[in-house]
Image (tube, helix red, strand yellow):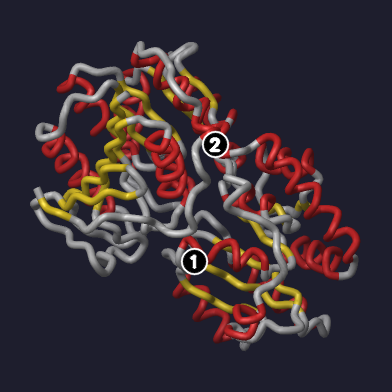
Amino acid sequence: MKILFFTHYFPPEVNAPATRTFEHCRLWAAAGHDVTVVTCAPNCPDGVVYEGYRNGFWPQIEEVDGIRVVRVWTLLAANAGTLRRILNFLSYLCSAVFVSFRLSRPDVVVATSPQFFCGWAGVLVSWIKRRPFVLEIRDIWPESIAAVGALKSRGLLRFLELLERRLYLAADHIVAVGDGYREKILEKATVGDRVSVITNGVDPRSFIPGPPDASFLHMWDLEEKFVCSYIGTIGMAHGLEVVIDAADRLRQNGRSDVCFLLVGDGARRAGLEHEVQQRGLQSQVIFAGRQPREEVPRILASSNACLIHLKECDLFETVIPSKIFETMAMGRPIIMGVKGQAREIVLEADAGLVMQPGSAKALVECVEQISGDPELAQRLGLSARDYVAEHFSRPKLASRFLQLLHTVAGIEETAPVEEVPTATPSLVQTPATHT
């Protein structure tokens, strides 16, 4: 089967959309399918093109783990602000549709959010190629950006919501990453049984529990400390001010042995770093910056607990952060600061403790409970690993997605993806070419 996949993000970018798309496409390609991904030159979150790539009007083509990757020109924008980012999204739509005229006709077109202009690229190309279209929804956009105050123009918001509804109606099938997303979609558009839920997950063979990495701990001066890590985007939606307040409380309580490690980048990082310096918390809150994807297992192994947090908001109760599955696979206790289905998963798995989002007091209590009870930490970690391997195995989820694509395309299914080899820690790619 020929699959044409549109995504704004793709490795070497390390955010959740890039990872999910890469893992699914890699597994489909390894199962013998012809997979082409149309994406941007890697530049997230700073809006600066990664070394070895270029943002040219002539597409850059490479092969990554059996996937043909076509990188198109976009108006670059950092992961902050509104107008320039929308222009960035629109430029991707135009470039992606334009390059599709030079691509062979697929059996099915797939496009993924979080920004739905990527979805509209999929709609237009499916019309041009006269092929069925599957829309993957990872974020209820633009509602999510309005929820954090990044979009304040009511007129623009109403226009984007109209486009959102039309997008849902244009899809032959919609894949949502959680039940909450599915309910939101059904509230906005009458799409009936054309919505399926395929959650995020993890390949347990790529995230194997192990001892802390001594060199990593030494690099960040974390020896002999209880390390509570946050790994992911440091953005407006994540409410990580709570970490600074919790660190201050712990210092006042005489807990100099606890350190919060923030791994990642985003719109709020600079502001949070400034506040940490102002409050003299540099030894309690450490910013490790953006790290390569292959470093994540080592970071998780070196953490005593992992924080997963979003601001308290009704919309965010529909979110299931993909990082929970990697943390569970590594057997690390979770401190869950997200309500809704994500919290239910952690509680059902007995994989961690829950906190009120935005409450520094609650975060401190969770840290002290886990750090003071090694048997509890061990039990949570073991339970987490067993649960995620049974319920959220990436190969099994990719196989379900592939079955759906076969059904939508009207093509008989072939080999299941569970039988393909595990992912390698780093990308294997051929030299880029231009066409």
What is the quadrant of residue 95 in the picture?
top left
Name the residue at 57% across, 47% down. Answer: 321
Q: Quadrant of the N terminus?
A: top left
Label 2, on which residue?
A: 395
**Which amino acid, mark 1?**
Gly
Foreground pick, 232 / 222: 222
User: Helix, strand or loop at disc 1?
Assistant: loop
Q: Nearer the viewer, mark 2 or mark 1?
A: 2
Left or right position of 7 against 414: left
Give the alpha-carbon distance from disc 2 to disc 1, as whole Å: 26 Å
Residue 250, x across and y down, in percent? 77, 77
Residue 318 against residue 429 in the figure, above or below: above
**Which amino acid, mark 2?**
Pro
Residue 383, x across and y down, in percent? 80, 47
Label 1, on which residue?
A: 264
Left or right position of 423 against 12: right
Residue 317, x across and y down, in percent? 61, 40
Marking on residue 204: none
